[in-house]
Amino acid sequence: MKTSRTLSRRIGGLAAVAAVVLPLSACSLGEDTEAAASDCPWTADESVTGTVRIGYQKIPNGDVVVKDQKILENCLPKATIEWNNFASGGDVVQAFGAGSIDIGLAGSSPSTKALSAPLDLPVKVIWIHDVIGEAESLVVRDGVATDITGLKGKTIATPFGSTAHYSLLQAITDAGEDPADYKLINSEPEQIAPAWANGDIDAAWIWDPTLSELEKQGGTVILSSKDTAEAGKPTYDLGLASDTFIEENPKVLEAWAKAQDYAVDQILGDPDKAAESVAVEVGVSTDEAKAQFAGLTYLRASEQATDAWLGEKLGADLLATAQFLLAQDGITAVAPAATYSDGVDADVAASAG
Amino acid sequence: MSSSHLEAVRGPRRWLGLLASLVVLLAVWSVVAAADLVEPHYLTPSPLEVWDAFVRANSHHAVGGGVDRVVRGEENYYLWEHLVVSLRRIGLGLGLGVVVGVPLGLLMGTVRWVGDLAGPYVDFLRSLPPLAYIGFLVAWFGIYDASKVWLLFLAAFPPITLATINGVRGVRQDQLNAARSLGASGLQLQTQVIIPATLPDILSGLRVAVGFAWTTVVAAELVNGLPGIGGLAYLSGTQNKIALSVACILVIGLTAIALDAVIRTIEKLVVPWRGKA
Amino acid sequence: MSKGIDVAGLEHSFRARGGAVPALDRIDLAIEPGELVTLAGPSGCGKTTFLRMIAGFVAPSSGTITVGGTTVRGPGVDRGVVFQQPTLYPWLDVRRNVALGPKLRGVGKAERRATADRYLSLVGLSDAADRRPYELSGGMQQRAQIARVLAGDPEVVLMDEPYGALDALTRERLQNELLTLWRETGKTILFITHSVDEAVFLGSRVLVMSPRPGRIVLDEKVPFSSRSLAPDEIRALPEFAETAARVRAAIAP
Ligand SMILES: Nc1ncnc2c1ncn2[C@@H]1O[C@H](COP(=O)(O)OP(=O)(O)OP(=O)(O)O)[C@@H](O)[C@H]1O
Ligand SMILES: [Mg+2]
């Protein structure tokens, strides 16, 4: 007697189904992975409460070590630490723009974008996670060219607006060539390997895992960001924090910087242990992680707080990056030099030194 | 009676056919994967590799690669938990889409000038690809679930509204006249005639909206989409874990089909008169 | 209680693409309370238009209609309408369809259910009460529609070719049911039909409308609906055949 059931009763039945399903989906998901929890390496600060919203990327540096080993969670036991994963520095900058995160990791190009018009975000660089070396390199299809001049007229792929893009253009300019003579194409990292296999591109300035993949497919590295850095145009992965957060949470940032410094120390002194965390977080093997460590330069807090880095030099590097970005239509104006030197805050690193 | 009898005969045969085609598909897939027609190799995972990735993603498993740590699923969530989070977002977006879309459609369908005024905007919104405005939503509503639910809502409500308007305009004039002659007030006309008469169209709109929401959820989860099945599919792609990506895509596809079947069942239960009256 | 209908100087023309289409032309008519008036006429002459104006669905170009002394300005519970095409609601079962009028008036659940069951048994549909309209035959749907109108307890019942699509047997049974109902309730009924036989057999008064633009060309009191003879015997009466011949002549002169 199905037909005798009325519409309202049927809707009631649906509501009952919903009542069963909704609480099920409202239950909290996920679970803390045990095993990695080591206690705070120094005295934990129990006075800090509230939420710290962090934007991170899957890059083999101290940030993912801090996350995996729960150093911040252990050292700020009363605070809630929220880790949000982003695929690119552009996304992290967007999240700062939306006021959705307090601390985040972005390359020097997107960080410069954040400080320049039209964004003019109220953020500061407070940390150098790494100086990019051979981690970002120019891979060339075998036999196509042995130096950058030989690549003229050839197709080179790189994610536009990235640090790799910056290094590529610097390398072209340093070789006395005009970028207009090259076919540069914008491509997401994960689409470069298929394009390469398809024969669509001759070269790419890119990072792992695509970099290793291209080498496996017979590519040769002819230049790297280490070379451009040595030529005076370094690129970085930087830690950013919003101005208000810096003002209101010195204790959080001190613990954060200490945690980062601890992670750097571990990468330098106990790479096996750090590599395990990188393997878990980035999704590579420990051997690959250790190989990737070699492609980046890590700086202890005491070192990066000096004028050679955060204290002075980085502001100038950001200004140079801004001039590059302006030429690339990445920003609408280069701010006065003071904006970039003021956009770097060495105090946080100093507090951990 | 007779149609269910037919189904009873056709049922097993249909399932057998489906099974056979599935076997053939898996075989062809395996051969293509083994033949390495596409370079690099990791881009063409075999069905077994995908199954492995699926199982790993739903269990505690060793990280491998020289680490003897056991982790939970992917990114600390099981694959089904990623799915549930995405479903929750879709459910919220669709729920809001219904709560806003249906009354708006009823209003636009009944009050001519409201329909004329708001119609072009709804049409415009419907024709926009969600990727085009996710950036704005992130700027306004942040990178957390609010912006994602907003995006899904904006994707879901136009088809629901348009279907509702269609339904309202399609109500037979004499069904309204009959109710008026029986003493229906304006409000009673809405609740007793227009809304039930429009229900089949609302459900059709909902089906379209669900389909749209699935394609949109992946876009919504490109930014800070973890946990989330779309976010996981994207992340695994950037990490060259294509087997996991494929597993996610298959799960998305199968869930979408299942969801559609659920709505069709609801249709059968709630509007059994569809196509008959 | 039943009400009378007064139509004065009624005219109507539809605005169509080719200009105004005259549909009704100067109709003056007084229907007494409790009359069963049948209205016949060729297809397209304006019968439905006339009925819809009394129902209040369409406003006339000029002239007035009053029902029970009140000018018609829109649909109302005093006038029940049985449509040419049944307009039952598929989302309600038959009982709830019939109970809709009382429900809209705020009658309690048990009471309106009882009312519905009473009228369903009156039209012989008690067994189908739990079914959906689309599960009924055309004749059953028409009967359900009639039950719904009666359950609304209108003073005037307007019926637009309600039996047009039925087979002869069902039709005759429903005609007899209608007469029984009319005698029991004493309602004013306006009944449109194509069939001369039906018009003469059912009506206490027969009207014939001329081809477009429609006007009343025959208006005659008819005795047969009040006679207590069996239907077959009534149809066999010589007066029946004479009246039918007059009506037929009026329709197609
Ligand atoms: N909405 C309308 N717009 C324009 N013309 C109309 C409209 N409704 C009816 N007409 C015209 O008015 C005339 C009368 O129509 P009506 O439906 O009243 O005829 P009828 O006598 O009921 O015919 P039938 O016996 O076939 O049902 C017809 O010529 C028809 O074409
Ligand atoms: Mg008609």
Image (tube, grey):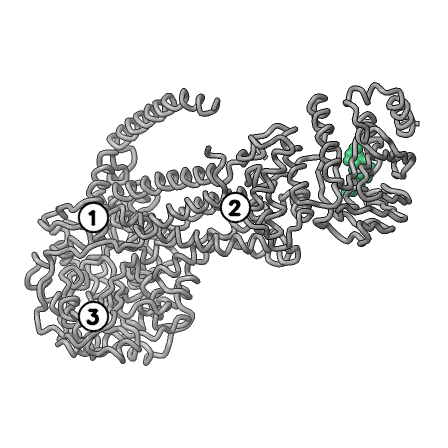
Give neighbour class at mark 2: few <14, some 14-19, many 20+ (Cα, 10 Å).
many
Q: In the structure shown, which secondary structural element does the residue marked by tag 2 occupy?
A: helix
Residue in front for this viewpoint, A274 or C133: C133
Q: In the structure shown, which secondary structural element does the residue marked by tag 3 occupy?
A: loop
Please identify the quarter of the rendering in which residue A317 is found.
bottom left
Please say if B70 is above or below B136: above
Give the residue at mark 2: B202
Which chain does tag 1 point to?
A: B
Q: Position of residue A142 (x, y in %)?
A: 24, 44
Q: Position of residue C196 (x, y in %)?
A: 83, 27
- Which label lies toward us, 3 or 2? 2
* Residue C206 visible, this angle: yes
How far apart are labels 2 and 1 at the CA level? 38 Å
Which chain does tag 3 point to?
A: A
Residue in front for this viewpoint, A148 or B14: B14
Q: Is residue C181 left or right of residue A94?
A: right
How far apart are labels 1 and 3 at the CA level? 26 Å
The amino acid pointed to by label 1 is Gly
Q: Residue C183 got which mark? A: none
Q: Position of residue B227 (x, y in %)?
A: 28, 54
Q: Which sits earlier in the primary sequence, circle 2 or circle 1?
A: 1
**Residue at screen point 83% across, 38% down:** C46
Please say if B74 is above or below C175: below
Residue furthest out toward the front: C228
**Residue at screen point 27% across, 59% down:** A85
Residue furthest out toward the right: C253
Give the residue at mark 1: B73
The amino acid pointed to by label 2 is Ile
Q: Tell me, yes or no, whether the two marked residues, 1 and 3, touch with CB atoms within 8 Å.
A: no
The amino acid pointed to by label 3 is Ala
Please say if A286 is above or below B172: below
